[in-house]
Amino acid sequence: MSDLPKSLVLVGAGKMGGAMLEGWLALGLDARGVAVFDPYASPGIETLCAARGARLNPPRETVAPPEVLALAIKPQGLDAAAPEIAGFVGPKTLVVSIMAGKTVANIRARLPAKAVVRAMPNTPAAVGRGVTGAFPDAGVSPRQRAMADALLRAIGGVEWVADEALIDAVTAVSGSGPAYVFYMVECMAAAGVAAGLPDDIALRLARATVEGSGELLHRDAGTPAGQLRVNVTSPGGTTAAALGVLMAKDGLAPLMERAVAAAKRRAGELSG
């Protein structure tokens, strides 16, 4: 793809960084222009870099400032990492950060960055079905935004927001959201056991139900989730009885609102 950068440095190749790297290389990013830095790189990352020709932990002085510097380290590690990676930021380098809570101002205070994109992907990126919320600061050129968009779309959908403050809300909804869904599967399985099902059958039923429902949402993207719910709810039936509990005044909606608010608040606490 023409929008892909010719050179890229990835700092942090854990689960999310590794998923992004795999997606980028599969999309056609030239591995010869890629350098990956992670002192604790997994055997999988070592194998991927060796197989594709990307450099893993090369001497820093051999790496020129790239078109894109992707930061996939834990937000708590930015202060310690900044002095070591500042040299990767040239006057034309776009910094793409997926660090939760770290604002453009946080990054600019630690790195000589003139163009920053804050992005928040989620873990389904590992299977190419992630979704990312992204914000470009005022220094990002149209060409740089196109590069960032191409890189982020390698792991799923992208939603661009006009206000950086919304990234914390993105983090709370989609960034942390997969854990909410996994916990729902746990709760559905436990409820099935309480209703008399064997543990293993209850878990398989809960998992398959969420997997299939997600696929319906994906394939029928033009239909609102509320309409899909209505489509499978017969008046006076079993589903309606259950929804009467979930949609009660003290049901799922206020609980989810409190959960998302807690995640958003924590994202804000991670800044600074």
Image (cartoon, rainbow, N blue to C red):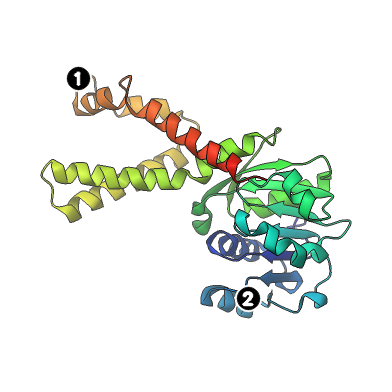
Is residue 66 visible to the viewer in this orientation of the structure? Answer: no
Which amino acid type corresponds to the residue marked 1 in the rendered image? Gly
Image-quadrant location for residue 38: bottom right
Q: Is residue 136 above or below residue 23?
A: above
- Numbered circles on residues, count: 2
**Mark in front: 2 vs 1:** 2
- Of the 4 image quadrants, the one containing the N terminus is bottom right
Residue bearing the label numbered 1: 236
Helix, strand or loop for disc 2: helix
Q: Crowding at label 2, few (<14), some or many (≥20) Cα neighbours within 10 Å?
A: many
**Most foreground residue, 71 or 146:** 71
Q: Residue at x 78, y 41 (%)?
A: 137
Residue 270 appearing in the image: yes
Are the residues tagged 2 and 1 within 8 Å (C-beta)?
Answer: no
Q: Earlier in the sequence, mark 2 or mark 1?
A: 2
Q: Residue at x 13, y 52 (%)?
A: 198
Which residue is more in the foreground, 78 or 7?
A: 78
* Of 267 and 150, the residue lying toward us: 267
Residue 161's image quarter? top right
Specify the quadrant that holds the C terminus.
top right
- Name above or below for residue 162 compared with residue 125: above
Q: Amino acid at mark 2?
A: Cys
